[in-house]
Image: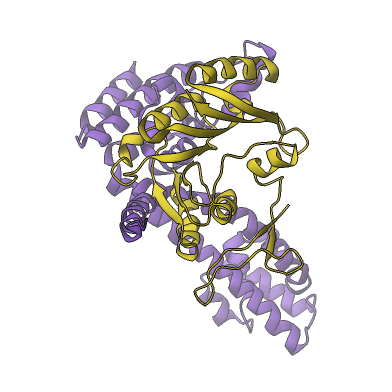
Chain colours: A purple, B yellow
Amino acid sequence: MTKHKDLFFKYTISRLKTELERADQRIIAISQILSSLPKNINEIFEELRIIGDILYPNMEKELTLEEYVRLCSLEEISENTLKKISLDKTKIRKILEIQEMGLSAELEKDEKIIFINLAKNLQALLDTKKSLEALEEKMVKTNYPNFSEIATPAIACKMIEVAGSFERLSRFPASTIQLLGAENSFFRALKTRSKKTPKYGFIYAHPLLINLNKKDKGKFARTISAKIAIAIKADLGGKDLRKELTDKINSKLKK
Amino acid sequence: MAIKNLIKENGDFFTLDLNNKEKRYWDPTRSKVCAALKKGLNFLPLKADSTILYLGAAEGYTCSYISDLAFQGIIFGVDFSAHSMQKFVLLCKERENLYPILGDANKPEDYKQLVDCKVDLIIQDVAQKNQIEILTKNAKEFLKPEGYVILSLKTTAISQRDTRAIIDEEIRKFEKEFTIVDKRRLDPFEKKHMIIVGKKK
């Protein structure tokens, strides 16, 4: 018996494509990259500093990571080139001071080229990270407007990633959403039967929650997670509840 | 364990020749069916021309060997994960008798229209809490009256309790629908697993 095998391919591949191209799966992929990218950037930064320390001693304390990488990718150091990479006047003065004192070593040409290349690669990674973050925020905002408004885009992405899919997340109750991201401490508390169960997971980083004092944090985490749960369900149904939910949160905040 | 390789070349099937490089090794640590055979499973209800429904095909490691054994038959591989289905579709392109289905084994009515014939054997390898329920659902829909089932039971997917107690409980459920032909624990190869071969009542 020969079967209609093409039909199987057509059906499976078309379903496979829609499955893989779904917005929440794309967001999960991006946030997985973003969770491991900073580690890699830090590792390469350490490697960069092995030679960077010889060339620009003590500068890692003065400059931010981005500024340091931009400094390392310079071929020549003068006041003009330093101005081009948008450094402060005080920082420029310090770098030039070190150069004048002759504290920094002179490298051979080949070595310098390789070093600059490494710095440029790290710069590219930093740019990728920035653009990925922007892309992720845009995707969440367009696909899940209510959810990203109430929970902020960064927290929303993390929640979708942990849940595995948006559809699964929408079935979580508010109490689960409150503790998403605190699984380890939650199960530890259950195992040891201690009374110190966690009060918040990812929503700890919520901008409304950070400035509250310790006593109100737990209570307010509960209200926010309840509103997030409603917002997720509104996104699934295609409704716009942004105003009502923010009003409710603000009125609770005043109390 | 070695098995002949069946990928078509020049229109002919390869023939079994153990001294030749055409044999392929079946790794019992990767495939539970192979592990059961290694442990002395004395009955594999497979013929060269049987139709088989494989639930939980994943990337198709076991499926490829089953397709070598049943080289004149048809094997439907069902899996839920889109990511591993990508690799499985490529395997199906290579092998004539493999058919891919992306679907949930929990809902046999989803792929009912594709699998339009009854099958001789259902092999199930989905690590789910309601494994037996999934198997009986599919058996009702697709299995021939005298058909067989092979169930690989993952006890940790059901509960973290004592393994033996879970197995006893699950076997009681299993015996309501099927008669047990043979069963093996897979201990050195897969911990807390069991392969059960059954026949439809």
Q: Total label count?
A: 0
Q: Residue at x 75, y 37 (%)?
A: B39
Q: Along the line of sight, which residue is nearer the eye, A208 or A14? A: A14
Where's residue A238, x and y in %? Answer: 21, 37
Q: Residue at x 43, y 50 (%)?
A: B82
Most distant residue in the left direction? A239
Q: Residue at x 70, y 65 (%)?
A: B17
Image quadrant occupied by the N terminus of chain A: bottom left
Q: Along the line of sight, which residue is nearer the eye, A241 or A23? A: A23
- Seen in the picture, residue A142 relative to A91 is either above or below; the reply is above
Where's residue A10, x and y in %? Answer: 31, 58
Q: Residue at x 34, y 55 (%)?
A: A8
Residue B156 in view in this figure: yes
- Seen in the picture, residue A20 relative to A175 is either above or below; the reply is below
Where's residue A59, x and y in %? Answer: 70, 64
**Quadrant of residue A168 in the image?**
top left
Image quadrant occupied by the C terminus of chain A: top left
- Seen in the picture, residue A148 relative to A33 is either above or below; the reply is above
Q: In the visual, does A207 lie left or right of A236?
A: right
Residue A179 in view in this figure: no
Q: Along the line of sight, which residue is nearer the eye, A216 or A11? A: A11
Where's residue B191, x and y in %? Answer: 72, 32
Q: In the visual, does A218 lie left or right of A173?
A: right
